[in-house]
Amino acid sequence: MSGAVSSDRLREAGTAAILAELAPLSLLSAEVRSRLTERARLEDVPPGQSLFDAGQPAHTLCAVIEGTLDVEVPSRGPAPAIIVTLGPGDFFGFECLLPSPSWRASRARAITNARILSLDGDDVNAALLLAEPPARADLAKEGTVSRRLFDALNDDQAAMSAGSAGAPNRRTAIQHSVNKLGNALTSPRLYLALIGFAIFFGLWQLSVDTLRLPRFKELPTLVAVVREWFSTNPDYGLSIFVGEYYSHILISLERVGLAFFLATMLGVPLGLSLGWSKKFREYIFPLFEILRPVPILAWVPLAIVMLPSDESAVIFLTFIAAFFATTLNTMLGVQSIDTSYIRAAYCLGASHKQVFRHVVVPGALPFIFTGLQIAVGIAWFSLVAAEMVSGQFGLGYVINTAYTKIQYPVIVIGMVTLGFVGYTTSALVRYVGRRLMAWRERELALSGVH
């Protein structure tokens, strides 16, 4: 790792001075380093002795003070294991910086007589949360050894010769996309999904057209729906070649987008406050729980009375259900955080605001994005109910109008369109969540969860 110091200098230094010399811990304040020093320990390791093995619980971050070690990351495929030789000033044991519980994905063994400095992982996590961004970046991404180890853990195809000082052989974006496409085409999931669709459409056609079962006799056949949907001159005036079709989609998207934005902006802060403050939760949560089970349709009369226009009423009805889902999941996310992180941050001198910003908010993110995925789905079916009652445009309005005019193929077209658009918005939320929580993907990969 960059910033390593000579073994002679480290031999003469005390633990506090060692922490001050080792990058990126040298970027921490003297007060934070002194707190780390209180629980740090030095250990002499003879040649050939193992410090830890893959699969063991990860509790400590280590730095080499004297001597050399080998850190080996076992391969998860046919590729050889990645072995990195460490010297004075290099860190290893990064698995302990992942959210608890974390497990070793590597093994470490002394090559020569070595002196190792061990730091409690929870203490280092809390210290880095309070540090300026350069310190966190140096530890997680910039150091030569840590960069190689993290690349090896995060890239199934990474290849590195033993002890090589070069960077891993990364795939290009095009290669990555081609590999993903190839994996998708060879995966049984795609074909199982196609079989599921084939069974559904087959049963639809069989029940409605071939057998003409009494309960399905009024439903449109699959052929009739497809013909109407893709017709340049549709019988009921709605198909992919009609501009009005896309106008309804865009109007519904605008309403859901605005309602989802409001639910996120209001629900996430409220949920964080409910989870973080016991007194605030005692005031607000009982009222929240009484209102949460109220169905959307029960809010319709009040929405029409309170709000000056049909558009405002539709957006309010779409917002209200998404708001409750977002708030509740955010609150549960805060309550799920391991209290040892909060205690460690306080012990390292963090203020109430710093703990909330650097520990509580990141720790709640998985639950927050789970709530947002649920919320965007709830927003869509709330929108349909609202548009059926008081809307004049949108997919819900299309479905309701088609029912009153006995245009059954249009009902199915509206339903399928809702499914496609709703799936796309949910996938977008999932994508944003994965990008903002790359550390979560790394944690699951290291723990063997797929």
Image (cartoon, rainbow, N blue to C red):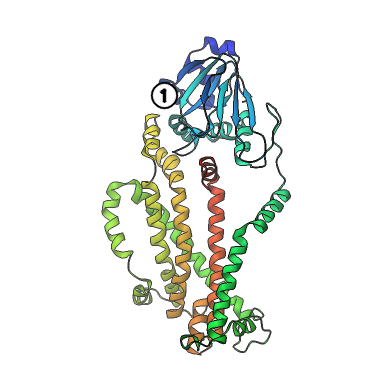
Give residue 372's position: percent from left, percent from top. Answer: 47, 58
User: Taking 135 as reference, is 111 above or below it?
Assistant: above
Look at 64% across and 42% down and name the residue there. 156
Task: Count residues near mark 1 (Cα–Cα under 10 Å), then give few for <14, some for 14-19, many for 20+.
Answer: some
Image-quadrant location for residue 206: bottom right
User: Taking 353 as reference, is 112 above or below it?
Assistant: above
Look at label 1 and name its amino acid. Arg
Left or right, 192 with respect to 279, comes to right
* Depth check, front residue: 7 or 164: 164
Look at 48% across and 83% down and name the residue there. 400
Left or right, 328 with respect to 369, comes to left
Residue marked by disc 1: 35
Quadrant of the image for the N terminus?
top right
Look at 32% across and 66% down and name the residue there. 293
* Depth check, front residue: 242 or 307: 242
Left or right, 23 with respect to 180, comes to left
Image-quadrant location for residue 47: top right
Give residue 61's position: percent from left, percent from top. Answer: 50, 27
Give residue 57's position: percent from left, percent from top. Answer: 46, 33
User: Taking 178 as reference, is 171 above or below it?
Assistant: above
Image-quadrant location for residue 285: bottom left
Question: From this viewpoint, is residue 221 visible?
Answer: yes
Give residue 163's position: percent from left, percent from top. Answer: 68, 26
Helix, strand or loop for disc 1: helix
User: Taking 167 as reference, is 200 above or below it?
Assistant: below
The residue furthest front is 211
